[in-house]
Image: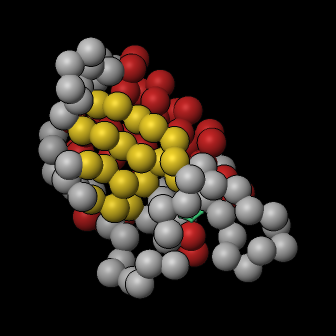
Amino acid sequence: MPKPERHVLVCLNLRPSENPKGSCAAKGSEGLFDALKAMVKDRGLGGRVIVNRTNCLKHCSRGITVAVYPDNVWYGGVRPEDLEEIFQTHLREGRAVERLLMPDIPWE
Ligand code: FES
């Protein structure tokens, strides 16, 4: 595989349910990660885009958190139904999905 054009990080951090910070895994990020990874592979971007699981990306209250590099674009509150738009608009066409951008909030 050549050096990827884009690197997508999906937070899979899990905290106990009683933790007030919450966590992306508790919001379903494992399934979201699996779906995005399969989408990238099945639709022919596997040689250009790499999708990795990460621990906490420090925007827990706005999760599920997804970051795309080298664009330094951060998405918050990502749901499975948002993946199609992220795939098509950002990963295929190179434009950030404005409606999903993480607000400019302090890192948690
Ligand atoms: S738990 Fe996902 S950003 Fe912190």
Pinpoint residue 63: horizontal percent, then vertical percent: 54, 64
Who's the residue at 20% across and 49% down the image? 70
16 sits to left or right of 13: right
Q: Which quarter of the frame holds ligand 1?
A: bottom right
Quadrant into which the N terminus falls? top left
62 sits to left or right of 101: right
Pinpoint residue 25: horizontal percent, then vertical percent: 66, 53
Pinpoint residue 81: horizontal percent, then vertical percent: 49, 47
Who's the residue at 52% across and 33% down the image? 35
Who's the residue at 51% across and 78% down the image? 108
Pinpoint residue 7: horizontal percent, then vertical percent: 31, 40
Q: Is residue 44 above or below residue 105?
A: above
13 sits to left or right of 1: right
Q: Residue furthest bottom?
A: 106
Who's the residue at 36% across and 54% down the image? 67
Q: Is residue 47 above or below residue 96?
A: above
Where residue 98 sits, quadrant-wise, is bottom left
Q: Is residue 88 above or below residue 10?
A: above
For the question of whether residue 85 can be seen, the reply is no
Q: Residue furthest left?
A: 94
Where residue 16 sits, quadrant-wise, is bottom right
